[in-house]
Structure formats: C-alpha cells, structure tokens
Image: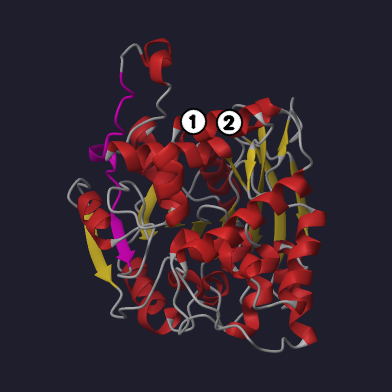
Amino acid sequence: MSLSSSLKFLIWAFFLGLFQLETNAFFNPFELNIPSGLLEDAQLNTIQLISKYGYPAENYTVQSDDGYLLGLFRIARPGALPVLLVHGLLDSSDTWVMMGPASSLGYMLYEQGYDVWMANVRGNTYSKRHVRYSAEDSDFWNFSFHEMGVYDLPAIIDFVLMQSGFGQLHYIGHSQGSTIFWILASERPNYMEKIVMMQALAPVAFLTHCRSPIVNLVASQDTAVASFLSSAGYNEFLPSNSVIDQFKRYACRDIISSSVCQSLFITLFGFDGQQVNQTMLPIVVGHTPAGASIRQMHHYGQLRNSGKFQQFDYGLLNFLHYGSLSPPPYELEKVKAKVAIYYAKNDWLAPPEDVDMLFNRLPNVVEKYLVPNENFNHFDLVWGRDAKRILWYRMLRVMQSVVPYSYHNDIDSITAVFVNRF
C-alpha cells in the first residue's frame, strides 16, 4: 500500500491536531497579522537566504560512503577556522540563518571571524538523493540516526577540512546534531582528533525523562506502530516537498491560530511563548519540519523504552546484526574531544535529568551551562529572541578559549560531487 506524500502529511497534521484537542497541552498565542514581506523568506532555501542578505554563499553536495548525497552550505571566509553546524531532528541547515542576520547563529559566527559550514543529514529537505535509490524507494529510508553518525558526519567533516585546508574544526550540534556526534565518537573514534571542540545545544542521548508527547507515544507502541506504518507505505515522518510547503505557508498565513500550524513542533519539543518571535512564525513553519525517517523516530522510541543509549534494536534479528541478543550500547567514554553542554529547563526532548545522565558519562566536558530562564525550551537555544544575549556570546567565549593544534590538511584527498558559488 502506498500513499502520496502530501496525503501522508495531511494525515500526520490531522493526528497532531487531534492530539492537541485530546490533551489540551498548549494554547494559542499567535493571533496576529503577518507582514507580507516576511513571507518571502519562508520560501527561500539556505543558499538564497544567505545571498539575499549579502553574505558569501556556497553550496556543495557531498557523497557518503553508502551513497547518500548530502547538502552542505557555507558562509565562506577562506583562511578562517571552520565551524560545522549540525541541525536537530526534523530540521535542516535553514535553522542557522532563517531568522535573519541579527538573530541567527550562522551569521553571528561569520561576523566573529569563522568560516561557517552548515550540514544536512540524510532524508531531510536538502539530502533526499542517493546514487542508487530515489526518495520514493523504501530502501532509501532504511536508516536511523545511527547511519548519520557513522557515514554522514565523516564524509562532511572530511570534506570541510579538505576545502578549508585545516586539520581540525569546531563542531556545534543541536539536539540530534549532538546525538550523531556521540555516535561518531563511539563508532569512529579517530574523528575526535579532527575536532577542536564540540558545543552541544540541547544534547540528546538518554530519553528516560523525555516529556515529548510524540516521542512518548511512539515509545508506548514501539514496534507495533513502526511495523504498521512501514506496511502502510509510510517511510518518512513529517515530510517536506513543494505541495506540503505551499500548504504550510498558506496555513500559517491565513489560519495562524490553527492547531495544525502550531502542533508540528510544540508537541515534540515544548513551548515558550515569551521566546517565540511571533512575526517570524511563518518563516519557521516555511522551513520546518524538514523530514525524518520512520526508523529514526522508532529508534528514539526504543531509547525512551530501554533507558539506554544504544544501537537500533532489531528484536529477534539482533544476533544476525550484532552477534548478540541485545543491541550494543554506544561508548560515550570515547568522546575524547572537549565538550561544552548547553541546555534548558523547559526542554521536553532533552530535560535536565537526561542531560545530567549524559554529562556523567562524558569524559571531557569543559562547560555545562543551564540557561538561566525557566521557560527556555528545545528550540529557544537556536531561535529564542534572547538566545544571543544569554547563550551565544557565552558559547563564543568558550570557543575562543580553545586553540586548535592542527591548522592545515591535505586538500587533494577528497572531492565533492557538486559545488555552486553565489
């Protein structure tokens, strides 16, 4: 059985709307008129946003070892130390620039002298191609966040270092962008030598205390839900395509108070009306959600149920995959790079209790900072109106306190598939 992606989105949106009605988990603060000029940015992609505001923009495609073609964007400052920004669950590189030059971390880092690179992992808006499969093939979606850490990050890190001529880079990961870094360290620990420092925003590893209704719902049903969705032709969770993007823009322009428009993220991550720049909401919804695989969500559900940070659980087939009855745990002790952790009290997906569990397992944490705002949530760390003042400047000072030991790299060893400069 196969359903069109547009129909799938409407079913998911209907489900989320019903979820709000059933739980009354949040309310509507978005009764406002949106200036028409802001709608333009909701329709621009990462490269167009960077170019619109006069910054040097470059666009690359990097191939992973298992054949995925990954979108990679750059605010180019040749000769400067590179910093790689890696987005979270259901997000994309847009998240680092879509709030405009005054309120986006990507632009701030460029203005502070860094060569800024923004990754996209497999399956999101900018990484929906493969050398053998199309996004319509079930085999294309046969991945969780495990493969992102094992295949996507190594390819992207190597390419950034090749292009920049440096031997190390700074890494900033939000949410899932931190999860896949822990996996990289566990499964390919030699890459820790290529990291000046890892800054983790709303880091995710353990989900024992997760309060996200959607993750917890998936976890409560676990294998049954995943099997049903797979057999029904669902491979992608909250997809993004032209039809769906047009629907989102229309919904948030003309029915801004609808539960569909608001529910897409609030039921996943929490809500803080004080930090939401309400006039920017159409831009947020224009760029997110950017898609994920059903297996990704299933894997998160497994972490929630097990209370462990471990590889995907294949059930009775674990012995064939791992040679053991249970999936192996990720070895957080191998995260040898310096790590700074930034987290928020009102974060439903990465609550402080789970961040503390992660902190106790990491061997080289040099900074652990709880944002001093009771209402800050998962996305306020990257979108909040006060994020620059109470968080980003602190991050910058921490970054500047660490000096890379290796400045140059062999720039002839790696090639990209495509490159466009604007």
Quadrant for residue 173, please give it.
bottom left
On the image, the x and y values in percent for residue 325 come to 31, 15
Quadrant for residue 272, please give it.
bottom left
Instruction: Give the amino acid at mark 2.
Output: Phe
Labelled disc at residue 228: 2
Residue at left 77%, top 52%? 241
- Image quadrant holding the N terminus, namely top right
Q: How crowded is mark 2: few (under 14 residues within 10 Å), some or many (20 or more)?
A: few
Instruction: Give the amino acid at mark 1.
Output: Ala
Question: Depth check: 51 or 242 in front?
Answer: 242
- Image quadrant holding the C terminus, namely bottom right
Labelled disc at residue 224: 1
Give the magenta-colored segment's residue range. Answer: 326-343
On the image, the x and y values in percent for residue 220 come to 39, 41
Assign a secondary structure to mark 1: helix
Residue at left 70%, top 70%? 50
The answer to whether mark 2 and mark 1 are in CB contact below 8 A is yes
Q: Residues within 10 Å of mark 1 (few under 14, many from 20)?
A: few
Image position of 21 with respect to 159: above or below: below
Residue at left 33%, top 33%? 310
On the image, the x and y values in percent for residue 391 come to 37, 76
Which residue appears farthest toward the front when viewing the image?
22
The answer to whether residue 6 is left or right of residue 106 is: right
